[in-house]
Amino acid sequence: MAERVALEGKLPVGAINTRASGWWAMIFTVFTEASLFAYLLFSYYYLAVQPHLPGTFPQGGQPDLKLALPNTIILIASSVAVGWAQFGIEHGSKQRLALGLGIGTVLGLLFLVIQYFEWAEKPFTLASSPYSSLYFVITGFHMAHVVVGVAMLAALTWWSSRGYFNRVRYAHIHIGALYWHFVDVVWIAVFFTFYLTPLLGLRA
Amino acid sequence: MRAFQAAILSTAFLSRRAQAAPLQYLTGAGAKAAPVVFLTWGVLIISIAVIAIIGLLLAGAIWRRPGETWTPGARTALKGHESGLNWLWIGVSISTLVLLFSIVWTVKVLAGIQAPSQKPAVTLEITARQWWWQVRYLSDDDARQFVTANEIHIPVGAPVRLKLVGGDVIHSFWVPQLAGKMDAIPGQTNETWIEASAPGTYRGQCTEYCGVQHSHMGFLVVAQPAGDFQRWWDHQLASPAMPAGHAQLGQADFQMHCGNCHTVRGTEAAGALGPDLSHLMQRATIAAGEMPNNGPVLAHWVADPQSIKPGSMMPAPSLSETELADIHAYLKTLD
Amino acid sequence: MASISDYERSPSVGQPNTELAEKLKTLWETEPGLTGWLGTVDHKEIGLRYIVTAFAFLVIGGIEALIFRLQLAWSNVKLLTPEQYDQLFTMHGMTMIFLYASPILSGFSNYLWPLLLGSRDMALPRLNALSYWIYLCAGLFLYSSFLVGFGPNVGWFNYVPLAARAYNNGPNIDVYSLGMILLGISTTVGAINFIVTFLRLRCPGMSVNRVPILIWGTLTASAANIFAIPSVSLAFFLLWMDRNLGTHFFDTMAGGSALLWQHLFWMFGHPWVYAIVLPAMGMVSDGLPVFCRRPLVGYTAVAAATVATMILGFGVWVHHMFATGLPNISLSFFSAASIIITVPSAVGVFAWLATIWTGRPVFTTPFLFFASFILLFTIGGVSGFMTGSVPVDWQLTDTYFVVAHLHYVLIGINVFPVAGAVYFWFPKFTGKLMDERLGRWNFWTMFIGFNLGFFPMHIAGLLGMPRRIYTYSDSMGWDWLNLITTAGSFLFGFGVLLLIYNVVKSKRHGPTAPHNPWDAPTLEWAVSSPPPPYNFAVIPVVASRHPLWEDRLDQSEDDRSHIETGLVLDHGKEALGTTTLDAEPNVILKMPRDTLVPLYLALSMTFVTAGLALVNWWVVAIGMALTACSILAWLWPEARLGETAVPATGKGPHG
């Protein structure tokens, strides 16, 4: 009887990577946040196919890529930095961890700054039209997620510099990186919707 | 089947039901209503049968053996385990067949009532407002277009196309005896059609919650033989006769106090916020189908609309007894 | 350099004894004083709070209904003004659907899941506490404007343009919108907790095909909520923006769309109505067989049907919009889907019928509720089937026929199973037995009252009575039907009060309950009534769906569940994590202590919500700062929980 119940070998104790409850919680948080963006983009596409006066959807015509495209690359780069950091701690390098997270944080901040300038340059405001409402609200929701992500990366950078994590114990990093990559993927979808679909013909 | 359908649609049965409950739809009166009435009875009978069968099976299951009494904590025998899966196979298969049949019937009826078999005799543009119905009769000839409110006349035996517009919030146009509902939504025009197979007055009601007086947003559809309908149309195009005496005083008062919201053809009263009153006396009801159109009721309505429809857009007028009486006299000339 | 060998161990196998029980009790019991009361992370306490709070809202929502049922009892009653009526019917719907129907099931699930799964607690105990506190705060917030006469007043479904600023200028809709967003956070984090618990915390041997159907029900509902809730939260947020910041999402005069609201609302709304019944159906699937003295017929079919219903439930939302002028092809598709979704429900009905037929009924109060549920489910189901057919729906929709339908499904498939669940699990929760004689009175008043109240609505609907009207003319033929409905509703309300009375009376004076008063088969009945704070002294190993019936179900002796022998996890508050499919142990999880941080976080979020309602950006900013601090405090790596390599507080995972 006792033989069936007993275990062979040892069990890890506490949060280890994908055995950490928090990691699974983040997976489903990502699902629910992804759904939120799916509904936001649904709203865009639903309003896009309604009848509009020519030139009003997108308002001001094709949105300018001169800030948005580099900004996209910056965000992708920050994801790469965070990925590199995680790779580093998986191989025991606390320095690479802190450095990579720090770079990711800075690049995330840069994304926010550039996005702010892009907002300021737009020829419309939040209340100008359905299109403008969609633009600011959807990119705004994304920005809010970036703000949370940057705060999180900053905290992770700080904790890493205090030596909290090692080759085995880095669940927080694993979970945080998952969130940050998700924010990046969402941006790709948002970028595609606002900046590329008009080029593909979805415009009034 | 045909006999059953005929029985349901027979005038006697119909008028008796319709009088008892003007908004019922277990009988109907038109080319659009008929197949739906049949389908409604069909799914209703299926549903009742299902409830009866499941109810009997449940009762049988519960009472086929003497029940066990219960003592807290006692370990009692378990029943032998026959799998019981046959119940699932049989029950779910039969259910699925019935459901598939219903889907096919539904799609057929839906396709059949999508458009009338003949070209519509008349097209109406109905703008639903809080809490009344503005009805514009369209015509290729601009001079033959006119606007009325709350009481819609249609020719018997011919389809009538309706274009529904939401004037402020979402409303829903429903005249159960003739057709199912269609919403009137701001920002879009919904097209539907109705047809009455027998002359009569059919009650309608708004069926999308639209604010405090949603309960009092009814209307009437009056189906008339073709000749009568034409005469009615011609009459609607005419301006009401010039009033005299108290009624003439009333007209002046009306123009000053009511003309900003109401229109009377051929006068300076040209407001579009409330119903067109040009031929008010021809209507059987007032306040959007809610009150009979007779002297005392009309007078009460004009003097104190908030007591009948609290929250309605028609304010209580600050008028003297004389002015109210004069206006009332004037309104009675709007035939 | 620390390595994994510092943080792993091979737990011993043992049997419960007094010493172990005492040690675990000290580790797991709620701390005394305010810290414990406000900061408990014990799923049983949180579950009971959910149940009590949900019942309070049930009573409040019921009173709202009874008041407007008086208004509707006859034609032309002048008890209420239209404004009062509109607020009452809106609050009734909102309260019942959001503040009762889901939280009550969360409450039962919260209490029962770890016990059913052979676990010490839910996977994320602090998140559990958070979900309750946000629920309470959101419920109070949602009622705040109603209590001063500015309650939401355009229906729980809140269609635009009626809900827009132009037609509704007070705080009514702002409070509704923001409160719903806050409540959505509670439901979402609760859903995440259930899903993670299911995937990670089942005891060894509890493979996915052995979990009770309640687990399937709550799991499915939780998965659906993860994907559905953002839709309605977004809808309310966009509405709040239209109303306060001048955006034009729903503004038809500026090119926005009124139907966009309906799509976003119902893409959530339809899955939601399945989420608030599937766990209750699970309770019946687990409870009814106990009183038929046999396992459920067709376990696999019922589990699959649960999942299928929920998945199909995402594909039918347009049936709430059949009259909005959609193209025929769309109508046909959604009509077919809405009719086909009946099939998995039929699986359930026949499984329950077969279980009773092939079993041997035991006439207890829970049995009465669980068995009658089958009939009510069928009635609610067929009226739904009828409305699924588009041409018929064009007559039935927005009449009392739909009101009848929705109450048969919500009261029949949520309230009746919940009442049965109260009687069934009360002995386990409290250690006392409920009064069976009073239980019969309770059942019959509820059953007769409910049918008397709501069956006539089918007829009123077929006679054309529209929804959401505050009065009607005497020439419509609806008077007597409404009078009977009002009388029945009062009787039903009295029945609900009897239930509450029986609960309170039995808690005080009921006879002591044994471990397993019903001789039921699942794990919760193996522990004491009420269970100890640590649930199981040693982690059970299960070998079937019915661990406590194995000897009588002829399960081979070598292949039985072990409840009295199992892994000993007593180096602090510990639970066992297992693999997803086969439930093999793979980690010892360190569980958190009681903490006030979830309460602080809930209050901070409520502060932000209030700031948005007042459109006061300072309040919002402060609230967000507090929120950020709470989250940081929550997530700060703790060595005690095995989250860091370097002991931040000097205590490793062993201490």
Image (spheres, coloured by chain):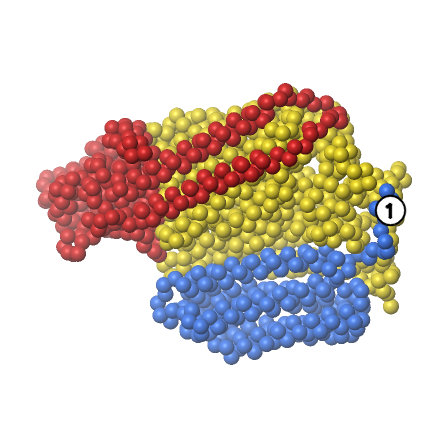
Chain colours: A blue, B red, C yellow
Residue C308 left/right relative to B328: right
Residue displayed at 88% across by 38% down: C17
Residue C609 seen by the camera: no
Residue displayed at 46% across by 70% down: A197
Residue C334 left/right relative to B161: right
Furthest-right residue in view?
A: C19
Q: In the image, is residue A184 above or below residue B314?
A: below
The quarter of the picture where residue C2 lies is: bottom right
Q: In the image, is residue B69 above or below residue C88?
A: above
Q: Badge 1 sits on which subunit? A: A
Mark 1 lies on residue: A3
The quarter of the picture where residue C275 lies is: top right
Q: Residue C351: percent from the left, percent from the top?
A: 59, 36
Residue B108 left/right relative to A111: left
Q: Quadrant of the N terminus of chain C?
A: bottom right
Q: Residue C616: percent from the left, percent from the top?
A: 55, 57
Residue type beneath disc 1: Glu
Q: Residue C607: percent from the left, percent from the top?
A: 61, 53
Label 1 element class: helix
Residue A83 seen by the camera: yes
Residue displayed at 24% across by 33% down: B292
Residue displayed at 39% across by 62% down: A50
